Image (cartoon, rainbow, N blue to C red):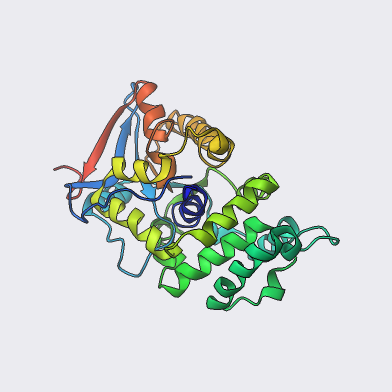
Amino acid sequence: MTRLLSTLLVSLVALASGCAAPTRTTGALAAPHAFAWEVEAPSGARFTLVGSIHMGKPGGLPMPPAINDAFARADALVVEVDTGATDQKQLQTAIMLLGMLPPERSLRQELGPELWARLEPRLSAVGLPAAGVDRLQPWLVTMMLQTLEMARAGYVHASGVDTYFLDRARGKKAIVELESAMGQLRMLAELDETQQKYWLQEQLEEPRRADELVEVFAQAWRAGDADAMAEHLFADADRPEYKDIYERIFFARNRRMFERLQDLLAQPGRTWFVVVGAGHVVGRDGLLDFFTRAGHRVRQLPRGDIHE
């Protein structure tokens, strides 16, 4: 069994964003590029597109000067979701409503004795009592488990790429959302029950912790290596059993983001700086692919000053 589902959940938490287990490593400075691109339309309108890792270790995702320079020149920040403007109480309520099993069902029953026995020690390791998750749907338990594993290893949202720019834009630049927190939650909650169980099972069978997997993504990000990031994420994208997952979590959202960004690009007099999960930027039917096919000029930024 591949490690698609467990690694995909890591990408949702850390990239936001299915993939096989990483097959090659990337040196932190293997290439002189940032994980960012300048996209220029035939009309001459342009914006900067940055791939984000949503959770990082303090100091673990140093921002190349070219990205900071492009941000300074922009008058508006575009993100998937403005987490700082989200009503946290409302979000927590929605998580519990969307993530609860029906009253007559329990997670222990849904998973069966063998899988439940694998789950209990992993929950204990991150301080979650088994009784506390017994009413939750598998997708929510998997998300909680991976998030807590990363947090225990020092990964926090406050050190993620999008939070870095949201903090700097707040009160100084316009902030535009491409999606909503509720929409992202519904996307996960609407996954087929069988897919949810596979997801949790593969997370439990994955020998590496979530933080060990996300470090592979961080290496590709620091190197500006779009090919490595795409390889880690999309090696199994064509497998029939996983196509619906990729479609729901990546490709359908990519199409909507592309259409929205096209609309923003058509607005005169604005300089946009766009930060979305790295998994939405790279690979076939990613944003770079869409803009290239639409006749836009795409140029990866160097790590240094934007005018190098």
Please name whichever residue, 93 or 28, is drawn nearer the observer in this view of the structure.
Answer: 28
Q: Determine whether 292 is above or below 153 in the image.
A: above
Residue 87 visible in the snapshot: no
Where residue 234 appears, x then y in whole percent?
42, 40
Residue 228 visible in the snapshot: yes
Where residue 189 appears, x then y in whole percent?
68, 50
Left or right: where 114 falls relative to 25: right
- In which quarter of the view is residue 86 placed? bottom right
Q: How many marks?
A: 0
- Residue lying at 58% horizontally and 52% vertically, measured from the top left: 199
Please name whichever residue, 226 or 307, is drawn nearer the observer in this view of the structure.
Answer: 226
Q: Residue furthest front?
A: 114
Q: Determine whether 173 is above or below 267 in the image.
A: below
- In which quarter of the view is residue 47 placed? top left
* Quadrant of the snapshot with the C terminus: top left
Left or right: where 183 falls relative to 34: right
Where residue 170 appears, x then y in whole percent?
46, 59
Left or right: where 280 falls relative to 187: left
Q: Residue furthest left?
A: 308
Please name whichever residue, 291 or 97, is drawn nearer the observer in this view of the structure.
Answer: 97
- Residue lying at 63% horizontally and 69% vertically, measured from the top left: 117
Where residue 76 appears, x then y in whole percent?
42, 46
